[in-house]
Amino acid sequence: MNAPPPAPQLDPHPFDAATALEPVAEGRWRGHTSPAYANMVGPFGGVTAATLLGAASRDARRQGEPLALTVNYAGPIADGAFDVVAEPVRTNRSTQHWLVQLRQGDAVAATATAVFATRRETWSAVEAGFPQAPPPASLARMAPLERARWTSAYEMRFVKGALEFERPAADPDAESLLWVRDAPPRPLDFLSLAALADVFFPRIFVRRPTWVPIGTVSMTVYFHADAATLAAIGDAHLLAHASAHRFRNGYFDQAAQLWGADGELLAVSHQIVYYRE
């Protein structure tokens, strides 16, 4: 009796290829930047955040699911290989705390802290309001930006606050609302959710239709969903909302929410961004 032919080997999703890490030793990993997620300078910050979270998530010592991730972008990441060091610094009954670094040569390009947690059923409530939006199929997909190749890796359908650099006047606010998912579609997990938390264009570009040099200095993501919730969403669109509080003396903040289409709040994020006039 002849054996069945081997199953075809499918190429990994571009996001999985971009966040792939090769184990070197306990707590030590080797990765490589991906041209599919290139930004104006270095890689898209969201894929860097996902890579750092992935180093701790893949470690055999990890306990629980992601609860919080803070990434500090210390310097530019050059195209090519990099090393990631991830170490648990304390494990409690409900939480586990990690320190993570991304290094290129002798330089530290990014640092992160990650907190994992074991969730238990308790009283729960949502105070944030689910934004009202037409279905994604009724909205046009934004064309990718040539100068930011990573925008080709996401399907973005804007309700409000798209980039419009041909617009002559400033907007009264920096609010954006859009449907978004990976392109090509990919089932949602914690790594892709971390990357999606940075998918919002810098708020200064929405408020003022002018290119200026910018760069995220620090971003924190708080995960409200568990793995089962993310698995149930599959590759469906998320409703993403972002706004700012203040622009002042070369820095502005950015606050964001990521919702499932059923009104489930999955994650919130906050970041501080540098800009130069």
Image (cartoon, helix red, strand yellow):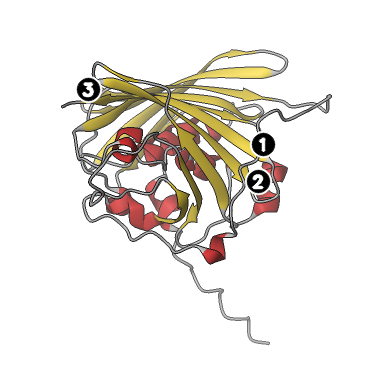
Q: Assign the N terminus to one quadrant of the image.
A: bottom right
Q: Distance between the Cα atoms at labels 3 and 1?
A: 34 Å
Q: Sequence order check: which comes first, mark 3 or mark 2?
A: 3
Horizontal side of 268 relative to 37 (left or right) equals right
Q: Assign the C terminus to one quadrant of the image.
A: top left
Of residues 80 and 66, the one drawn nearer to the viewer in this rendering = 66
The residue where tag 2 is placed is 230
Task: Name the residue located 63 percent from the left edge and 38 percent from the top edge.
Answer: 266
Horizontal side of 121 relative to 201 (left or right) equals right
Residue 156 horizontal/vertical position (percent): 44, 55
- The kind of residue tagged 1 is Ala
Verify CB contact (< 8 Å) between mark 1 and mark 2: yes
- The kind of residue tagged 3 is Ala
Residue 107, labelled with which disc?
A: 3
Q: Sequence order check: which comes first, mark 1 or mark 2?
A: 1
- The kind of residue tagged 2 is Leu
Residue 158 higher or lower than 256, as above or below: below
Task: Name the residue located 26 percent from the left edge and 49 percent from the top edge.
Answer: 167
The residue where tag 1 is placed is 225
Residue 102 horizontal/vertical position (percent): 33, 28
Residue 4 higher or lower than 35, as above or below: below
